Image: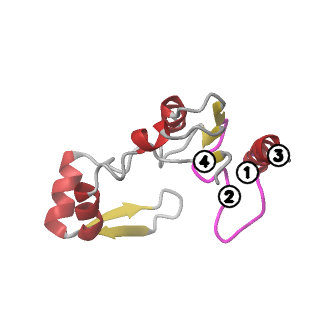
């Protein structure tokens, strides 16, 4: 049984593309997504879009959050270029839990300064780990 939830840099919607991008995705059969840090191009097939459209209700994060009744913490980098920091606030707002919080970590982005290959923790990374550990310790201690 889930007794608490923590998210890191989480999206608030799976359906987050402009109309033009959706048109191009359909026409080209894929969408390219550049990694903001490395410039690497990642992509998703048309199958992903088809699934998103066919399963919109199953992917409704607002509805999913409304079912969260356990303690919920959303952590997000204030300068996240991949996913708006507002996403954390929305997720927490939608949650049914009476124990919930959205924490924005200042001066950091989507990965809290972590890079691949791993180059060690950053102060932001250490704070996210500490916040997560504290949350779990608070709600999972028995």
User: Mark 4 or 3 closer to N-term?
Assistant: 4
Task: Find numbered disc 3 in the image and state the secondary structure of the residue it sits on.
Answer: helix
Q: Are marks 2 and 1 in contact (CB under 8 Å)?
A: yes
Q: Residues within 10 Å of mark 3 (few under 14, many from 20)?
A: few
Q: Residue at x 48, y 56 (%)?
A: 36
Question: Given this view, does label 4 or label 3 mark the residue nearer the observer?
Answer: 3
**Dot 4 crowding, Cα within 10 Å, few <14, some 14–19, many 20+:** some
Mark 4 or 2: the one toward you: 4
Q: Earlier in the sequence, mark 1 or mark 4?
A: 4
Q: Name which of mark 4 and mark 2 comes first in the sequence.
A: 4
Residue designated by label 2:
114
Please name whichever residue, 63 or 83, is drawn nearer the observer in this view of the structure.
63
Viewer-side label of 3, 2: 3
Q: Nearer the viewer, residue 18 or 135?
A: 135
The local secondary structure at tag 4 comes to strand
Q: Mark 1 and mark 3: span between their CA atoms?
A: 18 Å
Q: Main secondary structure of the magenta part?
A: loop
Indicate the position of residue 97 as horizontal and vertical percent values.
59, 32
Marks 4 and 2, how far apart at CA: 16 Å
The numbered dot on residue 92 is none
Q: Which residue is mark 3?
A: 137
Q: Residues within 10 Å of mark 1 (few under 14, many from 20)?
A: some
Residue 7's tag is: 4
Label 1 vs label 4: CA separation?
Answer: 14 Å
Residue 139 sits above or below residue 31 on the image:
above
For the N terminus, the image quarter is: bottom right
In the shown orientation, is residue 47 left or right of residue 114? left
> Which is more N-terminal, label 1 or label 2?
2
Is residue 107 magenta-colored? yes
Tell me which segment is drawn in magenta.
105-124
Can residue 84 be seen from the camera position used here? no
């Amino acid at each position: 049984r889930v007794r608490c939830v923590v998210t890191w840099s989480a999206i608030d919607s799976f359906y987050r593309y402009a109309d033009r991008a959706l048109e191009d995705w359909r026409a080209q059969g894929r969408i390219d997504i550049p990694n903001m840090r490395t410039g690497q191009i990642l992509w998703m097939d048309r199958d992903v879009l088809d699934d998103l459209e066919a399963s919109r209700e199953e992917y409704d994060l607002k509805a999913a959050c409304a079912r969260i009744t356990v303690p919920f913490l959303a952590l997000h980098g204030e300068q996240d270029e991949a996913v708006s920091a507002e996403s954390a606030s929305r997720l927490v707002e939608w949650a049914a839990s009476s124990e919930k919080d959205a924490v924005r970590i200042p001066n950091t982005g989507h990965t809290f300064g972590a890079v691949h290959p791993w180059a060690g923790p950053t102060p932001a990374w250490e704070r996210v780990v500490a916040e997560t550990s504290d949350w779990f310790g608070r709600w999972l201690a028995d």
